[in-house]
Amino acid sequence: MRIATQLVRWSAVALAGAMSIACRDSSARGSTGPDTTGENAQPAAAPAVDVVLPGVDSSAMTPRERHEWSSLVLELMAPCPSVPVSVADCVRENRACGTCGQAAKWVARLVRDGSSEEQVRRAYKERFDPSGVRTIPVDGSPSRGPEDAPVVVVEFADFECPHCRLAVSLLDSVLAAHPDKVRLIYKSYTLSFHQRGEPAARAAFAAGLQGKFWEMEHLLFERQEHLEPSDLDRYAVLLRLDVPKWKADMDSPGIKDRIEHDHALGEELKLKGTPTIYVNGRELDVEEDESLEGRVAAELGIAPHPAGDPPADATDGGSQTAPIASGSKPR
């Protein structure tokens, strides 16, 4: 299926961080959110003059919202440990912290959504504080990119989830833009209402035992509407796998244990939908006006790669699958 036109449209939207849809299990846990009590919180000193920051549009704020936002960005420290100034000073002085502008916009959104200053402080700590980084085991999981890459991207996905399908090109593009700097780890997390997702995951992991996980992964997402057993058999032939071995591996305890292990990890992390993506142990939320490329670039301390068509070599292992853009997980 060729979708070049759709790719251009979606890429522009996805890389702007404006996505807000995802596969979500109605039985999944809801967002825990920040603690809203704040009985002992001390309000920050109000700024004498409201802040104006380059790249941050505050024109839609009410005077009260602009005042609260100014107080917060002057109080909160820049999210980069090596930049010991406030978020506002980091942006105004164009400091070498690629996350400052994003942090200022993130705070603005919370203020406009009606969060109190104490709620914003607590949420900011959860989002940007180093203590919020999760350790995600990658043992035995399929991976692309160098093992010593400074940025590790972990994706939890469901082969029957259309929004996971949309994430393929975004991940491919980031890997192609930073070939020596990013490692991608795949984790299976099939939602309860997707009946064909788990067999498809077993098919992909079994193909991985013959060195063809990513080829099968791309093929399964490209042909997502066709995941019946006969379809999976046809894909194994198409990829020139040893089909009898592949079938035996699909039903092996090792493959089943891998899928169960990944799902249990997702439950431990309290995933609320798919795809869920972590960058260096911190969950990415594109609803916060942040793209995967933007987060990766911030981790590398460089400017984001320009949005647009993925490079010609974006797919791994010579796959001819047409990549498409990413969806997001709701909060």
Image (cartoon, rainbow, N blue to C red):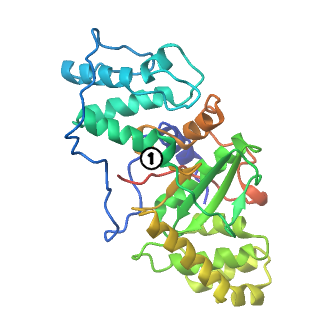
Above or below: residue 137 compared with residue 240: above
Above or below: residue 308 compared with residue 101: below
Residue 208 x %, y %: 73, 73
Above or below: residue 63 compared with residue 166: above
Secondary structure at badge 1 equals: loop
On the picture, is 167 further left or further right than 50?
A: right
Residue 48 x %, y %: 27, 9
In the rendered image, the quadrant that contains the N terminus is bottom right
Which corner quadrant of the image does residue 11 belong to? top right
Is residue 165 among what the camera can see? Answer: yes
Point 31% across, 20% down: residue: 70
Point 40% across, 29% down: residue: 105
Point 22% across, 38% down: residue: 40
Mark 1 surroundings: few (<14), some (14-19) or many (≥20) residues within 10 A: many
Q: Which of these two is toward me, 140 or 15?
A: 140
Q: Which of these two is toward me, 124 or 170?
A: 124
* Amino acid type, residue under disc 1 in the picture: Asp
On the picture, is 231 further left or further right than 162?
A: right
Q: Which of these two is toward me, 173 or 189?
A: 189
**What residue occupies the far front of the structure in this picture?**
40
On the picture, is 101 further left or further right than 316?
A: left
Residue 289 x %, y %: 43, 37
Looking at the image, how many numbered discs can be counted on the residues? 1
Point 51% across, 69% down: residue: 265
Is residue 308 among what the camera can see? Answer: no
Residue 195 x %, y %: 46, 80
Which corner quadrant of the image does residue 194 belong to? bottom left
Above or below: residue 103 compared with residue 214: above
Which corner quadrant of the image does residue 127 belong to? top left
Instruction: From the image, tell me which residue sits under label 1.
Output: 285
Q: Which of these two is toward me, 271 or 10?
A: 271
